Amino acid sequence: MAFTLKIGETAPDFTLPATDGKTYKLHDFDKDPILVIFFTCNHCPYVIGSDEVTRETAEKFAPKGVRFIGINSNSPNTYPEDSFDWMVKRMREKKFPWLYLYDRPQDVARKYGALRTPHFFVFDKKRKLVYTGRGMDNPRDTSKMTVNDLDNALSDLLAGRPIRTPLTNPIGCNVKWEGQDAHWMPADACDLV
């Protein structure tokens, strides 16, 4: 079995607390035609470098029924800045247009097969995976970006076209797994393409 969800697989369920003080399950988003779940964090330079492009993409597609959900699965024992308190602080300061959920046990990261921060998963109305990978080709310095793969995937999906590039490798810091070195990755984790 591959570490990361494959195209066509169904979104795994979750029950996670959010920075808004509520707890969410996957079915809470049943009315949203398209769901973008992305694994992110507070400290990674690739996340910080691309947050504003991700914000623009989320705001562009929100009126078309696309819901963005960020999930932080990083161990705060590896990076204290990735704690829940820092998540709350970051959302208060940045006012991002997505929910920010906390996967402290890292179970959801394992179910989805999150490789890096950021790592995007796009699901259609039936919650089948239609795109996974990077948001854009230069997340650390978006002034050098030449393609926004997430925007392309959402545009194709909404237009009823096949996703032109359904699979890309996420670019960013690896997920910080509890009890492991900061650069450790599970043995079955691998590039997607």
Image: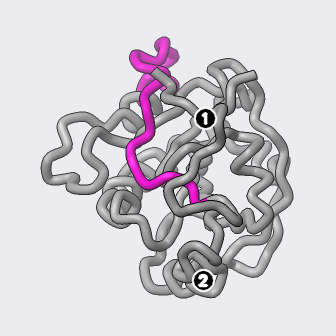
Q: Which residue is denoted by mark 2 in the rendering? A: 88
Q: Which mark is residue 189?
A: 1
Q: Residues within 10 Å of mark 1 (few under 14, many from 20)?
A: few
Question: Which amino acid does the dot numbered 1 rest on?
Answer: Ala
Towards the viewer: 171 or 22: 171
Q: Position of residue 162 (x, y in %)?
A: 49, 12
Towards the viewer: 36 or 181: 181
Residue at the spot 75% in from the left edge and 35% down from the top edge:
11
CA gap, disc 2 to disc 1?
30 Å
Q: Which residues are magenta?
A: 155-176
Check disc 1 and report its element: helix, strand or loop: loop
Q: Position of residue 90 (x, y in %)?
A: 49, 81
Residue at the spot 71% in from the left edge and 25% down from the top edge:
128
Check disc 2 and report its element: helix, strand or loop: helix
Q: In which quadrant of the rendered image does the N terminus lie?
A: top right
Q: Is residue 84 above or below residue 14?
A: below
Q: Residues within 10 Å of mark 2 (few under 14, many from 20)?
A: some
Q: Is residue 132 above or below residue 97?
A: above
Q: In which quadrant of the rendered image does the C terminus lie?
A: top left
Question: Which amino acid does the dot numbered 2 rest on?
Answer: Val
Q: Does residue 159 belong to the magenta stretch? A: yes
Labelled pair 2, 1 in contact (Cβ < 8 Å): no
Q: Position of residue 174 (x, y in %)?
A: 50, 52
- Sequence order check: which comes first, mark 2 or mark 1? 2
**Which residue occupies the extreme top position in the image?**
162
Q: Position of residue 177 (x, y in %)?
A: 65, 59
Q: Is residue 53 left or right of residue 102?
A: left
Q: Does residue 3 belong to the magenta stretch? A: no
